[in-house]
Image: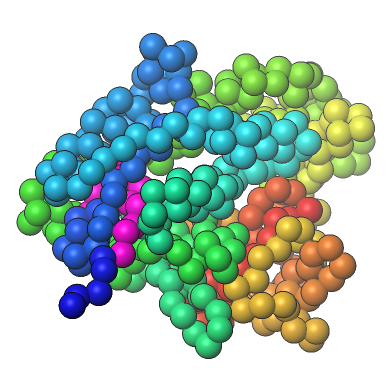
Amino acid sequence: MPPPMVRTVVGMSGGVDSSLAAALMRERGEDAVGVTMKLWPCAETDGGFTREDACCSPTETIDARAVALGLGLPHYVVDLEDEFRVGVVDGFVAAYAAGETPNPCVRCNEKIKFGALWDYARQIGAERVATGHYARVERAFDRWLLRTAADRGKDQTYFLFSLTQEQLAHADFPIGDLTKTEVREHARVRALRTADKHESQDICFVGDEGIAGFLRRAQPDVFVPGPIEHEDGTALGEHQGLAAYTLGQRKGLGVAWSEPLFVTRLDRARNAVVLGPRASLLVGAQRLRDCTWHLGALPSHGLECLVRPRHRAKPVAATIMPGEGGAEVRWAEPQPRVNPGQACVAYDQRDEYCLGGGWFT
């Protein structure tokens, strides 16, 4: 008697990656169920914007349903708008108001795709959640490890670093062994209507107004004008709100000086943007909070690793030391201070496994 099929919920966004993920799950012989999450008002009828490639827009949902039905899979739309607003958007707005630079995609994976969607999956008897992320999960000894994707240029482990062991145990990334080119080729062979669909790179809940415009509507009091000054005290101009600036920023400052200037400090007490030379940004170490480590607790002598302080950043050698309430990144060579609220993600020294990470303070 054959073993019972494993039921898996496949998160289908309407793009080629999740479409192929669903097709591959079907071909494995698993009991796959396509689910599209409604996360944000994206149509005029419910007060949102009408960018066609926006997450959960009518166009994306129609494409996801068409692919699912073409594969012979049931397809459902699950309303997670309240969960998304509380778990992702409210935190995004609050972080900017506090002078931080948040990463909503990390929070969405943690709280929605492998949080609220996993809760839904269990309700319908599913044992796993599959998505179109470029990543891989492996079991080693008693731990679940997050391995980088075959396509390093598309690797998304940075956005998955905060998943817990339980979440990784029930995660499936069917396209992790494929390159983007191979994904499109496989999709064409299977005649998936999303095979040549372009990708959206924007934050899904931000429309054409951009982040600044979104924040002006959501929390206008973060855009209070104040002084721009050199770190030596020289007045340089006026800004229209601290939320429009981040540490290390060079472009768009609107000031003239004898040498390139960077944002070296956001003085919230005085509502001032402070500028200075790049050397003023360099630090030897920086604290982390809310850490997740896939190998278990950090060793007392520290973890020698490679660190990505931003998604596309070149990995930098560092040692991460355990500390009360978090950890500390000690750079092998001084690095520009990273704005609080950004994700710090650690990798092994061969850059093959995501070891976890935390959030800069």
Front one among 343 and 18: 18
Q: Is residue 345 above or below residue 55?
A: below
The color scheme shown is: rainbow
Instruction: Give yes or no for residue 15 being in the magenta stretch.
Output: yes
Q: Which residue is drawn at the image coordinates 57% and 43% (left, top)?
A: 104
Q: Is residue 281 above or below residue 228?
A: below
Front one among 161 and 153: 161
- Residue 249 image-quadrant placement: top right
| Residue 206 seen in this snapshot | yes
Which quarter of the rendering shows the N terminus?
A: bottom left
Front one among 212 and 229: 212
* Region in magenta: 6-20
Q: Which residue is drawn at the image coordinates 40% and 61% (left, top)?
A: 127
Q: Position of residue 327 (x, y in %)?
A: 78, 68
Instruction: Give yes or no for residue 105 being in the magenta stretch.
Output: no
Q: Which residue is drawn at the image coordinates 84% and 71% (left, top)?
A: 323
Q: Position of residue 96 (x, y in %)?
A: 70, 34
- Residue 349 image-quadrant placement: bottom right
Tell how many labels.
Answer: 0
Q: Residue furthest front?
A: 1
- Residue 59 image-quadrant placement: top left
| Residue 106 seen in this snapshot | no
Q: Position of residue 250 (x, y in %)?
A: 65, 41
Q: Position of residue 234 (x, y in %)?
A: 89, 33
Q: Which residue is drawn at the image coordinates 26% and 68% (left, top)?
A: 4
